[in-house]
Image: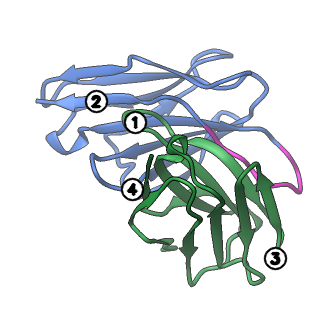
Amino acid sequence: EPEVTQTPSHQVTQMGQEVILRCVPISNHLYFYWYRQILGQKVEFLVSFYNNEISEKSEIFDDQFSVERPDGSNFTLKIRSTKLEDSAMYFCASSEWSAGSSYEQYFGPGTRLTVT
Amino acid sequence: TQLLEQSPQFLSIQEGENLTVYCNSSSVFSSLQWYRQEPGEGPVLLVTVVTGGEVKKLKRLTFQFGDARKDSSLHITAAQPGDTGLYLCAGDQSGAGSYQLTFGKGTKLSVIP
């Protein structure tokens, strides 16, 4: 069964450093998302991406964040200058274009980002 | 900001018992998705309900979407230890052009053998 994959599974970085989290969405999916989950809290939406551009973003997704689809398979989240409060699990998700239907989202296993 | 309230937050029951988990909001959602999440892993999609009043069954799990599409419930019959986990509901408003999911805080279920 197709699945979303994410690398690395765990990333430790120092405050102020740049990190890039990578995702390979399900191959025939056209909508891509990033969410994060701070330990013990609920899953929060960061950004959605469709047709090579951002379609929605939350207040969390400020100028320190960017997303990119550098090739036909990868979808990346970059944090330019990490802060302690960026420590969280970051989940990538994808959904299939399905006009008139719900947009079921399938999540990857996550990248645990630890900022020290 | 749309909010989804899940209750109860924690639930500990004996194997074989029935249980219901609730997901409520004051907002209308185009669809509600139920996920199960294990510690340190990503949410795994269980089911999506789209139509008001819709009922879907997945083995011993029954999911219902409220008539007004503001609430949903998950009922588990004869719970098994393998049902132990965190159950999350999440809604979208794709009908209004927003595909982001709003998640509830989850219900942590523990089924004791």
The colour one sees for chain A in the rendered image is blue
Residue beneath disc 4 = A42
Residue B86 located left or right of residue A97: left
Residue B110 located left or right of residue B46: left
Query: Residue, x 68% and y 71% (percent of image)?
Result: B29
Question: Which chain does the numbered disc 1 sit on?
Answer: A
Where are the magenta residues, as a range? Answer: A98-106
Identify which residue, B113 or B1, lies in the foreground. B113
Residue beneath disc 3 = B53
Are there few (<14), some (14-19), or many (20+) residues within 10 Å of tag 4? some
Residue B92 covered by magenta stretch: no
| Three-letter residue code for mark 3 | Gly
Query: Residue, x 45% and y 46% (percent of image)?
Result: B113
> What colouring method underlies this structural image?
by chain
Real-space Cα distance between discs 1 and 3? 33 Å
| Three-letter residue code for mark 2 | Leu
Do callouts 1 and 3 mark residues in contact (Cβ within 8 Å)?
no
Depth-wise, is mark 3 or mark 4 nearer the camera?
3
The secondary element bearing badge 4 is classed as loop
